[in-house]
Image (cartoon, helix red, strand yellow):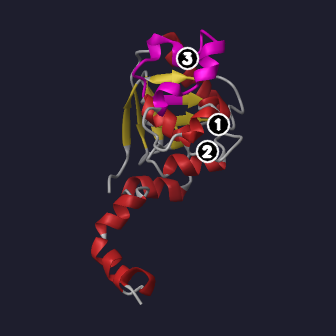
Amino acid sequence: MRPIDRIAGTAIPLRGNNIDTDRIIPARYLKAITFDGLGAHAFEDDRASMPNHPFANPAYAGASILVVNENFGSGSSREHAPQALKRWGIHACVGQSFSEIFLGNATTIGLPCATAAPEDVETLMATAERAPATPMVLSVDTQSIETAGRTVPLGMPAAVRDSLLTGQWDATGLLLADFDDVRRVADGLPYVSGF
């Protein structure tokens, strides 16, 4: 299991409320059997219709912290949305609020989503827009993000924070860590070991 605490890098600001999962990853990619390659299609339709979209701006290539406004990830339960963001290179999201299902799907793949006050989100966005190379460091443990000589407080549900800090967000890792127990239980199940 891999605990997640510190995420360091630059930020990509994405303005707008209620950005839904259809915009994050178009529905035609839901037929994918694996999530490999989804990163290349993140915000594909938005990028095609908005040439100035941040995900189309080379200044934000390599950014690892996505800064958003209200209700990010709304609209559907598709787990492809956080998968596409993570595979694009995003390692954490900071926003005013997140859709509950998006937050759950993001957490299960180790993509921290933290909230901040609207004025702090605006400060982070303005910083990234003014100077895209500005470094930022997000800490799950201290629930804060540091940038440009300033520390911004963040919020996160306690259960989400604990699962990230202990590595328990990783369900596969949990099973492998106690695989002897998994094998013992499986051996006792008649539909696994034979009747």
Count residues near mark 1 (Cα–Cα under 10 Å), then give few for <14, some for 14-19, many for 20+: many
Give the residue type at disc 1. Answer: Thr
x then y, percent, for residue 120: 59, 29
Count of numbered tags:
3
Secondary structure of the residue carrying numbered label 3: helix
Question: Is the residue under label 1 in contact with that under label 2 (CB below 8 Å)?
Answer: yes
Q: Is residue 69 left or right of residue 86?
A: right
Seen in the picture, residue 147 relative to 31 is either above or below; the reply is above
> Which mark lies nearer to you, 3 or 1?
1
In depth, the one of 59 and 87 nearer the eye is 87
Residue 184 placed where, x, y %?
32, 82
Q: Amino acid at mark 3?
A: Pro
Q: Residues within 10 Å of mark 2 (few under 14, many from 20)?
A: some
Q: Secondary structure at mark 1?
A: helix
> How far apart are the two marked residues, 3 and 1, measured between alpha carbons?
17 Å
Is residue 115 visible to us here?
no
* Residue depicted at x 38% and y 87%: 188
Relative horizontal placement of residue 177, taking residue 107 as reference (left or right): left
Q: Which mark is residue 21?
A: 1
For disc 2, the marked residue is: 78
- Extent of the magenta region: 38-66
Location of mark 3 (residue): 54
As drawn, the label of residue 137 is none
**Where does residue 167 sit, x and y in percent of width and height?**
37, 56
